[in-house]
Amino acid sequence: MKDVVETTPAVLILLGPPGAGKGTQARMLEEKFGLVQLSTGDLLRAAVAAGTEAGQRAKAVMEAGGLVSDDIVIAILRDRMAEPDCAGGVILDGFPRTTVQAAALDELLASNGQRIDAAISLEVEDAAMVTRISGRYTCGSCGEGYHDTFKQPEQSGMCDKCGGTEFKRRADDNAETVASRLAAYHAQTAPLIAYYDEQGVLQRIDAMGGIEEIAQGLATIVQGAMGQVR
Ligand code: AMP
């Protein structure tokens, strides 16, 4: 008789300050491991663009580089996680950012019989973050990320991934707002490193190197974490 192995979809968290590379790395992991990237920043920007009630409440806070209130973000995340494409596993990028959000996530996962497989802290120096953030932009069609210094399209002005020719920069990627976003990270999000360490799921990675090098290190961590659940 064959053993029946119960499997649960992987839940990974990427922790780190703005500019650490969470979005870039989450997209790469999404492709490599068939997981879904859930970025609360992307979900909030979509809500702002669509002019929903949550978007209207979030807009000014985001422009100032502060944190949107827990109730708005938790509701947005909960709705997104209930969608069918998340059933195969998720990478959370930019959530949780406060201890209230972390507790809400634990509760949500427990009610689905899930748990966090790894919370990976991307360790970087603040001084480098301003350069990283102020040079970044994305393809307006597919969202592929680029950077003035670190990652330009192979053919100037054309997206490597989809051939799109329109690019955009985020309104909050300016030096002043970056300082507020870094301050919010240190005051409200950095304590989550200890929170996940206590839960025994914390992994750390040096994220000061190049994109590919970091991706390789992350893939090894994710493989190990997923190997324990699959
Ligand atoms: P990000 O794209 O992750 O850099 O997020 C952009 C902005 O969206 C942040 O500066 C916050 O204003 C807001 N935001 C994104 N995720 C969260 C979250 N989990 N909690 C509170 N605010 C958030």
Image (spheres, grey):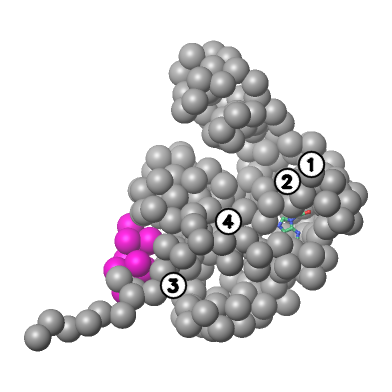
Q: Residues within 10 Å of mark 1 (few under 14, many from 20)?
A: few
Of marks 4 and 2, the one in the foreground: 2
Point out the residue furthest to the top here: 156
Mark nearer the N terminus (3 vs 1): 1
Give percent across and percent down for residue 48: 81, 46
134 lies above or below 104: above
Mark nearer the N terminus (4 vs 2): 4
Quadrant of the rendered structure where residue 174 is?
top right
Of marks 3 and 1, the one in the foreground: 1
Residue underneath mark 2: 46
State the extent of the magenta-drawn residues as a range. 220-228
Q: Residues within 10 Å of mark 4 (few under 14, many from 20)?
A: many
Of marks 3 and 2, the one in the foreground: 2
Amino acid type assigned to the residue bearing label 2 in the image: Ala
Residues at badges 1 and 2 in contact (C-beta under 8 Å)?
A: yes
Residue underneath mark 3: 117
Give how far apart the Cα atoms at labels 4 and 2 are: 13 Å
Q: Is mark 3 within 8 Å of ligand 1?
A: no
Of marks 4 and 3, the one in the foreground: 4
Residue underneath mark 4: 38
38 relative to 101 in the view: left or right: left
Task: Name the secondary structure under disc 2.
Answer: helix
Q: Residues within 10 Å of mark 2 (few under 14, many from 20)?
A: few
Mark nearer the N terminus (1 vs 4): 4
Point out the residue furthest to the front here: 84
